[in-house]
Amino acid sequence: MSILNKLLAAIAIACALACSSAQAASQNYHVTVDTGSLAGQEGYLDFLFLGLANAAPVQAQLSNFSGDFTAQSFAIGQAAGSINTLLAIGNGDAWNEFGQWAKLGGKLSFDVRFNFDGLDGAGTTLSVALLDAGLNYLGTNSDAVTFSLLPGSDAAVSTDDAIATVSAVPEPATWLMLAAGVLLVLSLGRSALPRSSYQS
């Protein structure tokens, strides 16, 4: 096999690893909500996690919160934990909600991971919104982000593009796969070099 063919084969393997990593990361997301238009106000960053009657059990794990949050919060149903460590919300009760009070005007961000327990059942929706003290929408008339979940499928994500962005977050195992692909490319490239090119 020629040097070029070896390198092309290695690159193809690395690309395949990259594609598989994107799929593996599809249930892990980084969310940013820009509250710049609400400077001087305060309100809840609210999470509502509701499943259909026969929904597959699923848990939303939220972490890495960043923003001007206060100590005030509330939890309803299967919502437990803290934004300072790990916030977990299940879909087992009829109403599962967590609200964290924040001073607005900057960016609020967090990571979310969805863990399914089984591959059968109906869907669940995680809605992320900005709410005032009366739990009414704040600065908009809709949710900032919505994740529509079905077991065995990637989440369908919708955003209010004026204030929210969502991006997939690779898991640590994904980075290891990519690193292995790069090492493979380098090793094949080195083995393809004439011995005289690296012997003294």
Image (cartoon, rainbow, N blue to C red):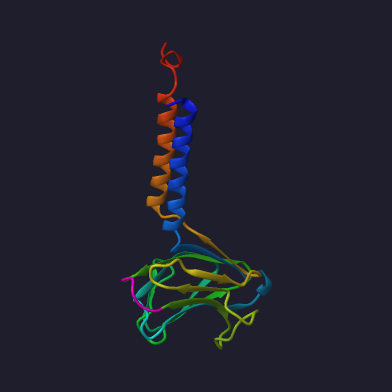
Q: Residue at 46% across / 77% down in the picture?
A: 125
Quarter of the image with the N terminus is: top left
Q: Residue at 56% across / 88% down in the picture?
A: 134
7 vs 93, nearest the viewer:
7
162 horizontally vs 15: left or right: right
In the displayed image of the protein, which residue is found farthest to the left? 118
In the displayed image of the protein, which residue is found farthest to the front? 1
Q: Is residue 9 magenta?
A: no
Q: Residue at 56% across / 85% down in the picture?
A: 133
Q: Height in image: 133 above or below 145?
A: below
Q: Which residues are drawn in magenta?
A: 118-122
2 vs 14, nearest the viewer:
2
167 horizontally vs 112: left or right: right
Q: Height in image: 198 above or below 86?
A: above
Q: Where is residue 127 in the image (x, y as percent from the top left)?
A: 51, 77
Q: Where is residue 56 in the image (x, y as percent from the top left)?
A: 35, 77
Residue 84 in which image quadrant = bottom left
Q: Position of residue 53 (x, y in %)?
A: 38, 86
Q: Height in image: 143 above or below 65?
A: below
Give the mark count. 0
In the displayed image of the protein, which residue is found farthest to the top? 200
What kind of secondary structure does the magenta stretch mostly adopt? loop
Quarter of the image with the C terminus is: top left
